[in-house]
Image: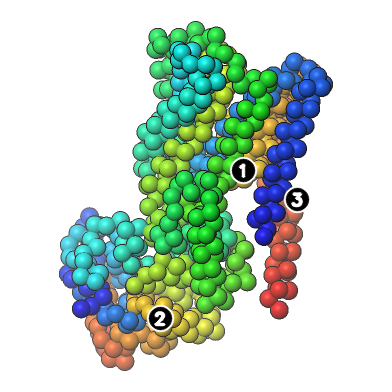
Amino acid sequence: MALLEVKNLGISFGGLRAVDNLNMSLEKGSLVGLIGPNGAGKTTAFNLLTGVYRPTDGTITLEGSSIVGKTPSEICKAGIARTFQNIRLFQKMSVKDNVKAALHNQFQYSLLESICHVASYKKKEKEMDEKVMEILKVFDLDVYADTFASNLPYGKQRKLEIARALATDPKLLLLDEPAAGMNPNETAELMETIELIRKKFDITILLIEHDMKLVSGICEYLYVLNFGTELANGTPDIVLNDPKVITAYLGE
Amino acid sequence: MENKKKLLINVVIAIVVYAAVMILLNSGLLNRQMRSLITPICTNVMLAVSLCLIVGFLGELTLGHAGFMSLGAYTGALLSLNLPFPPYVSLFIAIIAGGCVAAVAGAIIGIPVLRLRGDYLAIVTLGFGEIIRSVINALDITGGARGLSGIERLTNYNHFTLVFVLTLIVIVVVSNLINSRHGRAICAIRDNYIAAEACGIPVSRFKIMAFIISAFLAGIAGVVYAHNIGILKPANFDYNTSIEILVMVVLGGMGSIKGSIIAAVILTALPELLRGAADYRMLIYSIVLIAMMLFRNSNFNAALIEKKNLKAMQKLQKEGK
């Protein structure tokens, strides 16, 4: 059974059909790319998958159970984490606290424990700190643990966002243009990081990207969107040489 | 064990403040006017710290904090006037009940919070505070515009220990909360509610939670207020009061508990200490406010912060190598 199954997914904003009849099937452990020209509906598809928008039709099932109609926080609990195209960090919190905030559902204690700071609170907080440092080490962010997120350089902010998403212990990670605004060196480093986390955390990754070097370099399978509909899907070497796809990107 | 060191410093500060005030009180160095300032300072600290939870940490602007305070004050006053128990038992019940009534109001006002943000929420809470005042003004049980009088003065300067402990509890509750899973969720919502939701934080629940806790603490402050002055009038809880509390939080640096405490102490004491300047005191008070705000946003202050950040970065780089 596929980890994520999307069938006939569609959403209309008034008269605009932003995504129409999208079908996707993600196997566990795969690394899949979602590509398409600007305005094709890629981010809208992400927003549908994470519950930001409610689809007007179609079904989304994660490990056999439907997630349509759930709130974003419930979907996160169910096992889908994401990053954002325009970085959305908790700017006024430290790097450590950014990741810690994402551990919200994994290390639970009651409000009373929070207010009284009893022994169980201290124990849980210590466990959290250890887990946070473990995740930050993977991204070489551990030296910045006490820095404000807003003071990090751009590339590191992107990394922190991925680290934060991983802290929610997802089964499926959605990356929305992780290489946007990065120079070639940073992109190469990012590709390594993505490969690394995929193996280390044993997760499935779906990513939106415009950088074809990255897409063809690490994705195993591609879905191409254009004007909200699926244009093609297949392995990168087939899809990227498809005349239809080239036309969609470059025009006739 | 940086945390332990910080805790120790805070405990020492609390003891020093308590001892200093006790010595001043018992040595008779303070005149009547100064003595009567002690409890108002404490209530304002409680109010500022509790409002700091909403304005500073949740990041929502509210102008109805005096409403929560008045609910606590009236509930507490009515209970201690009517309960047949010994005064301190009544006061204890009054504090709990006052907090709870305010918390219920906090939950009710928390619901529109889910739909409104920023200036719109500020207007709604302003209206909410005014509604509470008008209702209190119209009811018989609260004495209407005449108000309630004859409340036993159980929290004036003669009972400084009690007031001080209550103030400490309020401060500890808020600062502990902020350094916990729940507090981080609240701060995450302030910084980016879309990302917070995507990280599995139920935004609605935590917004209402912040409002309830803040209202509860403001209710307690209200009870203390009522048992200090002994007379309650609805006019004491108009939106000027709400704004005064808000000014303390903003001046304290929004999101800094220590800042709120210091601002509350200064802004409560300042108008009274300036009484000597009679006609000019409100003018001086206003100028001080403007000057402090200008300083906060000045190039000079920005340069100071930058210098501090730079030092921290340099330290990091050294450690990195």
The chain that hosts pointer 2 is A
| Residue B278 image offset from top left, x and y in percent | 76, 16
Can you tell which of label 3 and label 2 is closer to the viewer? 2
Give the residue number, with chain letter if any, for mark 3: B300
Q: What residue is rendered at 48% in x and 23% in y? A: B94
Marks 1 and 2 sit apart, C-alpha to C-alpha, by 41 Å
- Left or right of residue B217: residue B276: right
- Left or right of residue A14: residue B113: right
Disc with the residue nearer the chain's start (3 vs 1): 1
Residue A103 shows in this picture: yes
Residue type at tag 3 = Phe
- Left or right of residue B260: residue A38: left
Given residues B102 and A219, the one toward you in this image is: B102
Question: Above or below — where is A75 with respect to A24?
Answer: above
Q: What residue is rendered at 79% in x and 25% in y? A: B24
- Left or right of residue A165: residue B251: right
Residue type at tag 2 = Arg
Residue type at tag 1 = Ile
Q: Name the outermost residue toward the front.
A: B86
Image quarter where the N terminus of chain B lies is bottom right
Figure coloring? rainbow
Q: Are marks 3 and 1 on the same chain?
A: yes
Q: What residue is rendered at 52% in x and 73% in y? A: A134
Give the residue number, with chain letter if any, for mark 2: A198
Question: Above or below — where is B182 with respect to B73?
Answer: below
Given residues A175 and A226, the one toward you in this image is: A175
Corner quadrant of residue B304: bottom right
- Secondary structure under tag 3 reads helix
Marks 3 and 1 sit apart, C-alpha to C-alpha, by 24 Å
| Residue B128 image offset from top left, x and y in percent | 42, 28
Give the residue number, with chain letter if any, for mark 1: B257
Marks 3 and 2 sit apart, C-alpha to C-alpha, by 47 Å
